[in-house]
């Protein structure tokens, strides 16, 4: 069974109503990203940061997977599918995908500020005073700017085994995630779906300048 690896970014969830800060001159829901997505921002104003992610978490319960999420989940009937996502939502899982790797963390988890391996499921507001078993403040389980991406090595290994690579809704500007396509076999077919693609088609890469729902449908028809 062929192994399809899918790399997804913010454009994957945009049609479900989840915004990306890159759509608004570096502002994310009205905030400078460094205020709400950096260790320095958390140290300076933890209440602001916690409230910001509480709002994102609440929003997540109001949106649904779109047809692109569902189509990728359905690919598992005929392919071995691994999804490597930059997104912190759970829409891939809710659509039915069973093998999802989150590079940048998950909104529905929180972790200890003392021990980053102490990660807990978290589906409600996270506030100051929510402590781990050691008595330290809990924080969003999100990889912030300036922090290491702990799952990147696993993602590289996954990409090295890809027979087909599908990239969806990412600017290809956020590293190290943007480097993952360079780890696939030179003979691996790559499909890149994005409304504003950051590269042109070539012998290995087929660029589809469409939103996720339309682009995924086109790729699946191509695979068949």
Image (cartoon, helix red, strand yellow):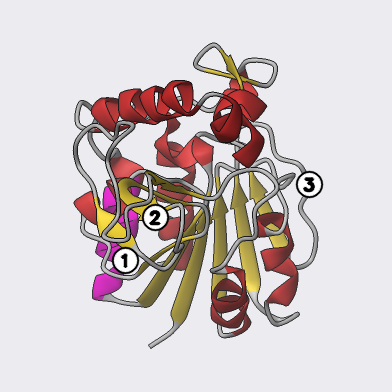
Query: Where does residue 151 sit, x and y in percent of width and height?
Result: 54, 69
Nearer-N-terminus badge (2/3): 2
Prevalent SS, magenta region: helix
User: Disc 3 designates what residue?
Assistant: 199
Work out how far the residue at label 1 is from the one at label 2, CA to CA, in angstroms. 36 Å
Query: Where does residue 83 sit, x and y in percent of width and height?
Result: 43, 64
**Label 3 crowding class (10 Å Cα cut-off): few <14, some 14-19, many 20+?**
few
Which disc number belongs to residue 75?
1
Q: Nearer the viewer, residue 105 or 134?
A: 134
Query: Where does residue 204 sit, x and y in percent of width and height?
Result: 74, 67
Asked whether residue 18 appears in the rendered view, the answer is no
**151 is higher (above) or lower (below) than 168:** below
Is residue 42 rendered to the left or right of residue 89?
right
Is residue 175 rendered to the left or right of residue 97?
right
Q: Quadrant of the N terminus?
A: bottom left
What's the magenta region? Answer: 69-77
Residue at 65% over, 35% down: 40
Say what secondary structure mark 3 lies in. loop
């Amino acid at each position: 069974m062929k192994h399809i690896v899918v790399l997804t970014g913010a454009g994957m969830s945009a049609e479900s109503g989840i915004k990306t800060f890159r759509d608004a001159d570096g502002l994310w829901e009205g905030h400078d990203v460094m205020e709400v997505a950096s260790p320095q921002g958390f140290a300076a104003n933890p209440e602001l940061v916690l409230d910001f992610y509480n709002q994102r978490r609440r929003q997540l319960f109001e949106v649904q997977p779109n047809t692109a999420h569902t189509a990728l989940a359905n690919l598992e009937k005929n392919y071995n599918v691994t999804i490597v996502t930059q997104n912190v939502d759970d829409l891939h899982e809710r659509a039915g995908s069973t093998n999802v790797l989150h590079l940048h963390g998950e909104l529905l988890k929180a972790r200890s500020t003392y021990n980053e391996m102490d990660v807990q499921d978290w589906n409600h507001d996270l506030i100051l005073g929510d402590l781990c078993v050691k008595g330290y403040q809990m924080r969003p389980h999100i990889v912030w700017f300036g922090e290491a991406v702990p799952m990147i090595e696993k993602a590289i290994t996954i990409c090295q085994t890809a027979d087909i690579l599908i990239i969806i809704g990412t600017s290809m500007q956020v590293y190290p995630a943007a480097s993952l396509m360079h780890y696939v076999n030179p003979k691996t077919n790559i499909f890149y779906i994005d409304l504003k693609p950051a590269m042109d088609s070539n012998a290995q890469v087929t660029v589809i300048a469409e939103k996720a729902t339309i682009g995924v449908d086109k790729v699946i028809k191509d695979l068949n």
